[in-house]
Image (cartoon, rainbow, N blue to C red):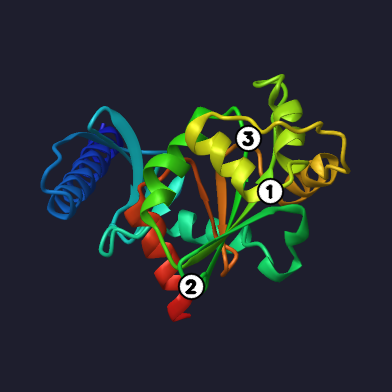
Amino acid sequence: MIKKIVSLALMAAFSTLAMADEASVKKAVEAAYPKFKVDKVTKTPYAGLYEVFMGGQIIYADEKLTFLIAEGRLVDPKTKKDITGERLDELTKIDFSSLPLEQAIKVVKGNGSRKLVVFSDVDCPYCKRLERNELANITDVTIYTFLYPIEQLHPDAANKSKLIWCANNRVKAWEDWILRDQLPNAAGNCDVPLEKVGQLARKIGVVSTPTMIFADGKRMLGAQPYKEIERMLSVTVKK
């Protein structure tokens, strides 16, 4: 009987301790993210890991809130830095100097001092949005555009790419199409590096368009706001 009482007392103590730990984690998370309400904190079977349900999603934290794991990414709750994102940036960096820029369309804007590579599908609506709404606002940059038609999505993109590449004025043909939807009057039967560009894209892990690569080797996906692109270009120059 005494053993049973002691056992129940220990269980109650452990339960109270667990509740106290969960309460402290809840308090710490809400202090770090005051705009969010923590609905529930549950200690997991994994050493020192707590499940935090907030904002309709699950994140994970340790008891002292030295880290958060949100959407599969490790986050520093003090600085709000996406540690996983930063590591991915480093691990997926490209050696810019190794890129075969002769296989790209070269457009110089302003003094052209900054460098940017773009993998673009001529029929990709986001690529047109990037050019028309974002890159149009940026100057003093040299943009190297690799024509990368994704035929599964845009079956006529390869043919249009050939017409643009084989035009007498390749830069004008590219700008006429991407900015004004006007294809050049060209035969499209010159030596077009589409296969080589496809091999390059697969080698460096480019799987969607538009994909931008900056001079420091970091990449950016999608038609991002021009201010964010400008920020990345400026960071690259400072380095």
Of labels 2 and 1, earlier in sequence is 2
Query: How many other residues sit within 10 Å of disc 2, few (<14), some (14-19) or many (≥20)?
Result: few
Instruction: Locate residue 49, reporting x and y percent.
Output: 39, 47
Q: Is residue 100 visible?
A: no
| 69 shown above or below 142 | above
Depth check: give the residue in front, 183 or 132: 183
Judged by depth in the image, the label closer to the viewer, 1 or 3, is 1
| 43 shown above or below 171 | above
Residue 169's tag is 1
Find the distance from the CA under tag 3 to the CA under tag 2.
26 Å
Judging from the image, what secondary structure is the residue with disc 3 in? loop
Can you identify the residue that label 2 sits on?
A: 111
Of labels 3 and 2, earlier in sequence is 2
Depth check: give the residue in front, 50 or 134: 134
Instruction: Locate residue 124, reporting x and y percent.
Output: 56, 29
150 left or right of 37?
right
Judging from the image, what secondary structure is the residue with disc 2 in? loop
